[in-house]
Amino acid sequence: MKVLAFSDLHRDLGAAASLVERSAEADLVIGAGDFASVHEGLEEAVAALGGMAAPLLLVPGNNETEEALRAAAAGLEGAVVLHGEPSEEAGLTLFGLGGGIPTTPWDWSFDLSDEEAEAKLAACPEGIDLLVLHSPPRGHCDTSGSGDHLGSPALAAAIERIGPRVAVCGHIHESWGAESAIGETRVYNLGPQGRVIAL
């Protein structure tokens, strides 16, 4: 099973076209948030992901709300939006949770506090295949340009409890391409070029 996963497209239509082309090699495509830039260009960015050769699963980032992403993806055949809910796609069990976690300093951002994230993750069953997040867990794939860890303690604790095979995220641009592990769980910060993950 091959999953093509990416994050933080931020209206990059060239990257979107490349991902659509690469989707022919995948059984599932995952977009881990931030298709827009400060709530601008969401519809155009999501439309550019049309024509995927595999099912497409999306979670909202902090640059678009859950409601806006659901509206933008409504016309996209085969697209599923997850935010605080489980799903089964392409034979895999998944759970998606988007938004900036913990709360960011920006008043325009779509965020959740660690407490709100913890409450939503209570619905996530243990031992799933793939946990799709926008924000990284604290201490894993979350290092800023100044060397600070900006990830979420609640997400790190949830990964320890749930024990997914893989957790994917984005959000911290300086950590694009980083990978780590929490117990047996592989953790990847994706970026807009994406990566193919074998499951």
Image (cartoon, grey):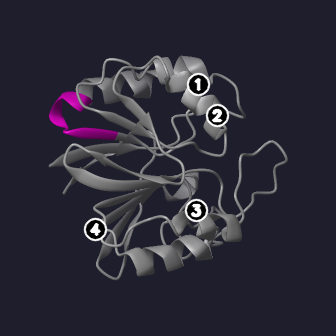
Q: Amino acid at mark 4?
A: Arg
Secondary structure of the residue carrying tag 4 is: loop
Give the amino acid type for the residue marked by disc 2 in the picture. Glu
Q: Is residue 25 magenta?
A: yes
Name the image quarter holding the C terminus.
bottom left
Up/down of 164 relative to 13, above or below: below
Measure the C-alpha gap from mark 3 to mark 1. 21 Å
Q: Which label was assigned to residue 71?
A: 1
Q: Are marks 3 and 4 in contact (CB under 8 Å)?
A: no
The residue lying at 64 percent from left, 30 percent from top is: 68
Residue 196: which numbered mark, if any? none
96 above or below 184? Answer: above
Circle 2 residue = 67
Alpha carbons under labels 3 and 4: distance apart: 19 Å
The stretch of residues the image draws in magenta is: 23-29
Mark 3 and mark 2: span between their CA atoms?
16 Å
